[in-house]
Amino acid sequence: MKVQRVVTPPLAANSYVVGSAMIDCGGDAEFILRYLSENKLINKIRYLLLTHAHFDHAGAYFALQNIGSTVGIHSKDIEISRKQPLAHGMLLFTPVNPDVVFKGGETLEIGRAKLKVIHTPGHSPGSVCYYDEDRKWLFSGDTVFSHGGFGRVDLPGGNAYELVSSLKKLTELDVEMLYPGHDEIVEEKANLEIKKAYEVARRILI
Ligand SMILES: [Zn+2]
């Protein structure tokens, strides 16, 4: 099983194709539909798993739902999206109307892969990571990035304490490959990058 990365407009969020699932979809419906069609994926994608409801990751979700994908997201990001908080005058959260609501702790079977939903609040209240324990893959959304980077906590719904404790939770996993919501993929020893992020975050955020 391979992971395909798609860098999506408008803010260069990473979206990933993993078998019949897509993890995040970016904010431009026309772009993602064109990508799926050019890569003969329109009839293949059955699930859209969102890491959080920020518009740059989830804005195009309805396009995937319209072609028959089951859309899943954590309940806390649905709640906050209904309050429609603004960031810099823009609507920050997409009011996603999902087919499946996660609480954290679920295991999703996507073809031969099993993805565990890990609730990692901090960047947003309902941020999640998707973890494949067998392959040691972590799809981390905006919680943790390559080079020890981590998500911002100053947007509505962000919380520094929660982010630090989410990063701590991630240091307890065995992760080889990190697929973050922005920037580059980490292809080996991602554990070290996550530890670095946790060490820096706990010093400067709290
Ligand atoms: Zn975000």
Image (cartoon, rainbow, N blue to C red):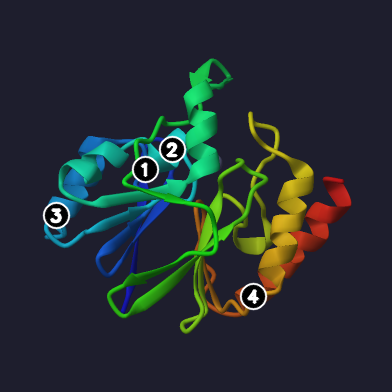
- The label nearer to you, 2 versus 4, is 4
Q: Amino acid at mark 4?
A: Leu
Badge 1: how crowded within 10 Å, few (<14), some, or many (20+)? Answer: many
Q: Amino acid at mark 2?
A: Asp
The circle on residue 173 is 4
Q: Establish whether ligand 1 lies closer than 8 Å to the Cβ of label 2.
A: yes
Q: Amino acid at mark 1?
A: Gly
Q: CA distance from mark 3 to mark 2?
A: 21 Å
Q: Secondary structure at mark 2?
A: helix
Q: Where residue 55 sits in the image (x, y, percent)?
A: 43, 34
Q: Does any portion of residue 140 appear in the rendered image? A: no
Badge 4: how crowded within 10 Å, few (<14), some, or many (20+)? Answer: some
Nearer to the camera, 142 or 133: 133
The circle on residue 56 is 2
Ligand 1 image-quadrant field: top right
Q: Are marks 3 and 2 in contact (CB under 8 Å)?
A: no
Q: What residue appears at the point 12 percent right and 52 percent down from the top-left corner?
A: 37
Q: Are marks 1 and 2 in contact (CB under 8 Å)?
A: yes
The circle on residue 42 is 3
